[in-house]
Amino acid sequence: MINWKLVWSFYLTFLIPFLYFLNILLAFKTPHTFKAPYALSVLGIFLAVCGIIFWITSYINLGSSFGILPQKQKKVKKGLYRYFSHPMYIGIWLTFLGLSLANSSWQGLVFLNLVVSPVLFIRAVLEEHKLE
């Protein structure tokens, strides 16, 4: 008998990071699809760097609690997690927003808002239900 929950989680483990990669690819492969002022590109780079710092710091704060899919475990309350519920998702979102703005890629912005943002929101909600 096939354990569909295990199969589903196996594919999601690859799908979610692939969606992140796809957003980065869109932002870089479709540059300058809208006319952006230089200041917006600079702001995009700043947001992307801040997002990466937030993302990496959150990952370090999670330690062994990190996982691609939500699992039942204790809620982390140290580092950035003391101030934000899901700082890693904030970092991911800021990074992709910044990359899309820096490259003036409307395709990256659309993908971020229609695909990545809902995925991050759903993951955050599922994690809240699993964390103790």
Image (spheres, rainbow, N blue to C red):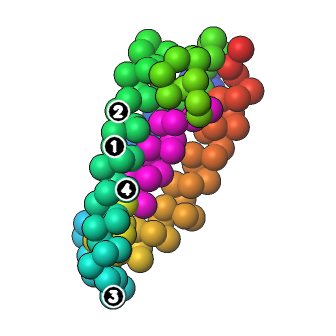
| Three-letter code for the amino acid on which mark 1 is drawn | Ile
Residue in the foreground of this view, choosing between 53 and 121? 53
Label 3 amino acid?
Answer: Lys
* Residue for point 44% across, 53% down: 94
Mark toward the viewer: 4 or 1: 4
Q: Which residues are magenta?
A: 85-97
What secondary structure is the stretch in magenta mostly built from?
helix
Residue 44 in the magenta stretch? The answer is no
Q: Are marks 1 and 2 in contact (CB under 8 Å)?
A: yes
Determine whether the residue tagged by mark 2 lies in a helix, strand or loop. helix
> Badge 1: how crowded within 10 Å, few (<14), some, or many (20+)?
many
Q: Work out whether 41 lies above or below 58.
A: below
Q: Residue at x 48, y 65 (%)?
A: 111
Disc 3: which residue:
35
Residue 115 x %, y %: 54, 59
The alpha-carbon separation of the residues under discs 1 and 2 comes to 6 Å
In screen coordinates, is 127 left or right of 53?
Answer: right
Q: Nearer the viewer, mark 4 or mark 2?
A: 4
- Using the image, tell me which numbered label, if any, was put on residue 52: 1
Give residue 117's quadrant in the image.
bottom right
Mark 4 is surrounded, within 10 Å at the Cα level, by few (under 14), some (14 to 19) or many (20 or more) other residues, namely many
- In three-dimensional space, the C-alpha distance between marks 2 and 3, rounded to whole angstroms, equals 31 Å
Question: Residue 59, image x and y in percent?
Answer: 40, 27
Whole-angstrom CA distance, mark 4 to mark 3, is 19 Å
**CA–CA distance in space, label 4 to label 1:** 9 Å
The answer, for residue 79, to whether it is visible in the render is: yes
Read off the residue under disc 4: 47
Q: Earlier in the sequence, mark 4 or mark 1?
A: 4
Vertical side of 132 occupied by 55: above or below: below
